[in-house]
């Protein structure tokens, strides 16, 4: 997959894209990144990428021509491509959206600054707007980096352990269970016995129940997307959690029998 980032602060991307999982994915040619400096496509003497808003008002607006000229230089990749404008007005990014983006061959992320981007650029060149949450950042760069990271982890081969992306929080409308490593006791707290038992089925059951408890306590809204197998329903009933989970909107998968 290739991700192209367009903005007026290209240096913003350097360190985050050269560390950890993203770095490894780039080295393994699982992810190709292109960084494009919109300012280099400004046509006036002062290399202006913004201007005052028509109609008056606070702040500046990103000019459409440098953005369009910069976008025109982004090398196309064969296959599915999407052009996304980072903006607090967009649909809110989610694990589901990350999964969708991970199926594209090329993602072009446009990072605005100032009060916004001239609507004619958005109208003609942008497929969708994407927000990372209901707060306003000083620019789209941090938001674009969030997307690169979340998408990168989902690319086949990007994570050391093949199935760890599937076990992440949200991949199944559940928050992740607690994690423990050595030592077996720390600050007077012991690791739950079952995790030391070597009984993988019991560990999986324990973790599932813990995930459900944590999600009920912290993000019950997520549970409306949860589909329970018969075995899971039985387990939750035994733990006294089934009613709460059903009330939060979880549904039962149709039985295969
Ligand atoms: N630009 C400014 N705020 C943003 C947000 N919340 N998400 C995406 N892009 C942004």
Image (cartoon, rainbow, N blue to C red):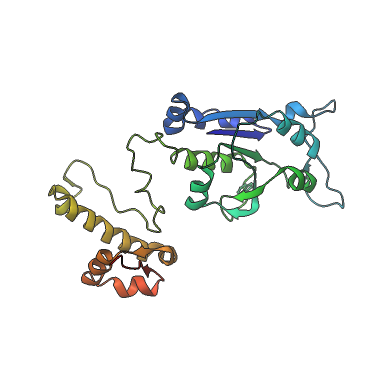
Apparent side of residue 181 relative to residue 93 in the rendered image (left or right): left
Apparent side of residue 255 relative to residue 124 in the rendered image (left or right): left
Is residue 190 in view from this perspective? no
Residue 241 to residue 154: above or below: below
User: Residue 102: percent from the left, percent from the top?
Assistant: 50, 42
Residue 96 to residue 235: above or below: above
In this rendered view, identify the residue nearer to me: 64 or 49.
64
In this rendered view, identify the residue nearer to me: 243 or 18.
243
Which residue shows up at 46% across the image and 28% down it?
A: 23
User: Residue 223: percent from the left, percent from the top?
Assistant: 40, 65
Which residue shows up at 61% across the image and 31% down it?
A: 77
In this rendered view, identify the residue nearer to me: 209 or 58.
209
User: Residue 155: percent from the left, percent from the top?
Assistant: 45, 38
Q: Is the C terminus in the top left, top right, bottom left or bottom right quadrant?
A: bottom left
User: Residue 139: percent from the left, percent from the top?
Assistant: 65, 42
Residue placed furthest toward the right: 55
């Amino acid at each position: 997959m290739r991700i192209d980032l367009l903005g007026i602060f290209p240096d913003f991307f350097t360190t985050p894209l050269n560390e950890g999982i993203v770095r490894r994915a780039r080295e393994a040619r699982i992810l190709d990144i292109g960084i494009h400096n919109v300012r280099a496509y400004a046509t006036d003497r002062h290399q202006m990428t913004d201007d005052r808003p028509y109609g008056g008002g606070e702040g500046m607006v990103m000019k459409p021509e440098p953005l369009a000229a910069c976008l025109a230089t982004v090398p196309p990749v064969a296959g599915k491509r999407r052009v996304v404008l980072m903006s607090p007005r967009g649909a809110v990014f989610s694990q589901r959206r990350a999964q969708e983006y991970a199926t594209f061959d090329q993602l072009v992320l446009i990072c605005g600054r100032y009060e916004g981007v001239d609507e004619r650029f958005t109208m003609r060149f942008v497929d969708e707007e994407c927000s990372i949450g209901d707060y306003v950042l000083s620019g789209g760069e941090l938001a674009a980096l969030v997307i690169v990271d979340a998408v990168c982890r989902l690319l086949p081969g990007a994570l050391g352990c093949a199935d760890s992306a599937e076990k992440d929080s949200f991949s199944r409308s559940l928050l992740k269970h607690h994690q423990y490593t050595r030592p077996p006791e720390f600050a007077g707290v012991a690791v739950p016995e079952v995790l030391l038992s070597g009984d993988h089925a019991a560990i999986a059951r324990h973790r599932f129940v813990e995930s459900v408890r944590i999600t009920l306590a912290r993000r019950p809204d997520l549970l409306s997307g949860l589909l329970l197998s018969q075995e899971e329903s039985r387990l939750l009933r035994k733990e006294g959690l089934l009613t709460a989970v059903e009330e939060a909107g979880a549904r039962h998968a149709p039985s295969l029998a």
